[in-house]
Amino acid sequence: MKSKCYICGTEFEGGSFDCCPYCGWMYYGFESELDPNEKDDGNLISINDAKRMVAAGKDIYGDPLPKKQ
Ligand SMILES: [Zn+2]
């Protein structure tokens, strides 16, 4: 099963509660129902913070993003 990361748009092999191999976001599949400014239990930071990190070239832990293949 393929899922598409809500944060960075990367498609990866996995489903709900698997982590994106690119940005590290734990994928839920219902991100659109969450408050994007609120931190939830599964991830360290909120959706909007995670998107800001990816836009700045970092994963959700603040490390540089891996190169896309
Ligand atoms: Zn991602």
Image (cartoon, helix red, strand yellow):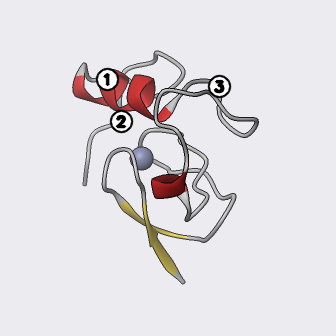
Q: Earlier in the sequence, mark 2 or mark 1?
A: 1
Q: How far apart are labels 3 and 2 at the CA level?
A: 19 Å
Q: Quick one: SS at disc 2?
A: loop
Q: Residue at x 65, y 25 (%)?
A: 44
**In the image, what residue type sits under mark 1?**
Arg
Q: Residue at x 61, y 58 (%)?
A: 28
Q: How far apart are labels 2 and 1 at the CA level?
A: 16 Å
**In the image, what residue type sits under mark 2?**
Pro
- Report crowding for label 3: few under 14, some 14 to 19, many 20 or more residues within 10 A (C-alpha): some
Instruction: Read off the residue under disc 3.
Output: 44
**In the image, what residue type sits under mark 3?**
Leu
Q: Nearer the viewer, mark 3 or mark 2?
A: 3
Q: Residue furthest bottom?
A: 1
Tag of residue 66 = 2
Q: Quadrant of the C terminus?
A: bottom left
Q: Earlier in the sequence, mark 3 or mark 2?
A: 3
Task: Indicate left or right for 55 with 20 as reference.
Answer: left
Q: Quick one: SS at disc 1?
A: helix
Q: Residue at x 61, y 71 (%)?
A: 15
Q: Residue at x 35, y 22 (%)?
A: 53
Instruction: For the residues labelled 3 and 2, say whether their Cβ atoms are less than 8 Å apart.
Output: no
Q: Quick one: SS at disc 3?
A: loop
- For this rendering, which residue is in front, 2 or 38? 38
Q: Quadrant of the N terminus?
A: bottom right
Task: Indicate left or right for 60 with 67 as reference.
Answer: right
- Report crowding for label 1: few under 14, some 14 to 19, many 20 or more residues within 10 A (C-alpha): some
Instruction: Read off the residue under disc 1.
Output: 52
Q: Earlier in the sequence, mark 3 or mark 1?
A: 3
- Report crowding for label 2: few under 14, some 14 to 19, many 20 or more residues within 10 A (C-alpha): few
